Image (cartoon, rainbow, N blue to C red):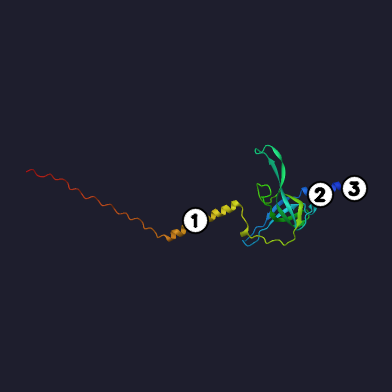
Amino acid sequence: MKPVHAILFICLAFAAIAAEADDLRIVDVRRNIPLSDDEPVYKDYYLSAGETGGLKKNLVVTAVRKITVRDANGTQTYGEMEVPVGQLRVIGVFGKIAVAREYKLLSRDDNPMLEQTGLMVGDAIEIKGSFVDDKPLSLKKKVSEVKLPAAEEAARTTASLVEASAKADESTARLMPPVPAATVVPAALPEPVASATAAPVQ
């Protein structure tokens, strides 16, 4: 192989690797449906480009979100920035697809704010700075321990308060003696007025 051809082949190989790295992102999110409160909750993140993207089991990678910066009116674009969201731990690689689970979410104390927190479809995966953690996976949270979204939590709290208020009203009604029906006493009739009788004229 001529040197020029070798250099061209190496450049094409690096370009292919770079293209695979650019395509490395979260393409789907799935969670199981627990049938009881004691059943663990799992949330799997499906990543594109498994083995070809350099992913392997127990590799911890960083998910970043591309954000476009615009002016207050939204008419002028100043550029884009990639904001770190959290870390994922690969639990298995299946050809061109890898499956990962949440390792930890990164604090916003040292990172820009996000309109939507948590990992989501479309977030890019960054291999730079990745490391291997082969410790056993921690026990998954049960349904009763999973933190609900704010809206769902507020709805449940409101429903609980309404139910508690209804029970309190029912208990109060049981404790209070029945109120007897009001007895209507007929008003005394006025005494008849004696008719005036004219005295006889003497």
| Nearest to N terminus: mark 2 or mark 3 | 3
Instruction: Check disc 3 and report its element: helix, strand or loop.
Output: helix
Q: Which residue is mark 2?
A: 17
In the depicted view, which residue is nearer to us: 198 or 123? 123
| Nearest to N terminus: mark 1 or mark 3 | 3
Q: CA distance from mark 1 to mark 2?
A: 63 Å
Tally the marks.
3
Q: Which residue is mark 3?
A: 6
* Residue type highlighted by circle 2: Ile
Q: In the rendering, at what x and y percent does residue 162 appear?
A: 51, 54
In the depicted view, which residue is nearer to us: 131 or 137? 131
Mark number, residue 165: 1
Contact (CB < 8 A) between labels 2 and 3? Answer: no
Instruction: Check disc 2 and report its element: helix, strand or loop.
Output: helix
* Residue type highlighted by circle 3: Ala
Q: Residue at x 45, y 59 (%)?
A: 172
Q: CA distance from mark 2 to mark 3?
A: 17 Å
